Amino acid sequence: MRSFPQRRAAGDTVPPNLCRLFLFPVSRLRLSFCRPAVAPWRVREIVEQLESLANSPGVTDIAIGPRGAWVSSGAGFHRVETWSFGEVDHRDLARELIERGGRHVDVAMPFADVRLVDGIRVHAVVPPASVDGTNISIRIPMAKPPTLEALVDRGMLSAELAAEMSSRVIRGRSILISGPTGSGKTTLVAAILAQ
């Protein structure tokens, strides 16, 4: 599938009945711009760059805030030097993303979490709950989650611990998995449940 800039340059159009503002095939962010009344032109510019970031190999997290944008591929966040959008743009983007998930975010409801198509999670916080400005977190699931064996091979946990956790889940026992943001909690749970 060609990107929006490629489609726009070729003069392609998308039939209105097939249009959705955000499409997420194969667990990767894919954006389409066939509903201009929903997304102002400036949001479209942001979304084009967001699409490019989200489709970069291995990207699992995008964080947007008053001081710019950052991406992570599982080895920590690094700043997106080309990000040039400001507070008004971030607020418009937050509203649009949260509305895509069937909720709203504004002064009366200054934070919201939604799950979009293919498990993409968006969290947005706007003023007054966020004193510096709008903050958006986008979590993009991996196209193909790793197996428990692959996590053992990568050193996330020992083979003994993996076997014990799998055994407990099979027997219907509870396990507790905790850790900071981006540490692999959801990845680990998915790998255990896929056994």
Image (cartoon, rainbow, N blue to C red):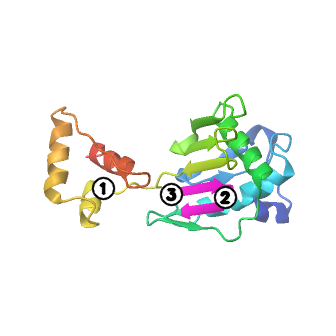
For label 2, the crowd category at 10 Å Cα-Cα, with few meaning under 14, some 14 to 19 and many 20 or more, is some
Name the secondary structure under disc 3. Answer: loop
Q: Is residue 12 left or right of residue 138?
A: right
Among numbered discs 2 and 3, the one appearing first in the sequence: 2
* Position of residue 102 measured from the top left corner of the image (x, y, whole percent): 65, 31
Which of the numbered marks, if any, corresponds to residue 147? Answer: 1
174 within the magenta span: no
Furthest residue in direction top, as rendered: 108
Q: Magenta stretch: residue 65 in it?
A: yes
Magenta span: helix, strand or loop, mainly?
A: strand
Residue ID at (37%, 54%) = 184
Q: Which three-letter amino acid code belongs to the residue tagged 2?
A: Glu
| Residue that carries the numbered disc 2 in the rendered image | 51
Disc 2 secondary structure class? helix
Q: Label 3: few (<14), some or many (≥20) within 10 Å?
A: many
Relative depth, front residue between 51 and 34: 51
Dot 2 or dot 1: first in sequence order is 2
Q: Position of residue 78 (x, y in %)?
A: 55, 68
Q: Residue 60: give its label.
A: 3
Q: Is residue 149 visible?
A: yes
Query: Gap in Å between the C-alphas at discs 2 and 3?
Result: 13 Å
Q: Of the two numbered discs 1 and 3 on the same chain, state the one appearing first in sequence.
A: 3
Q: Amino acid at mark 1?
A: Thr
Q: Which residues are magenta?
A: 60-71
Mark in the foreground, 1 or 3: 3
Q: Is residue 96 above or below residue 58?
A: above
Q: Secondary structure at mark 1?
A: loop
Q: Which amino acid type is marked by label 3? A: Thr
Quadrant that contains the N terminus: bottom right
Q: Residue 1, can we see it?
A: no
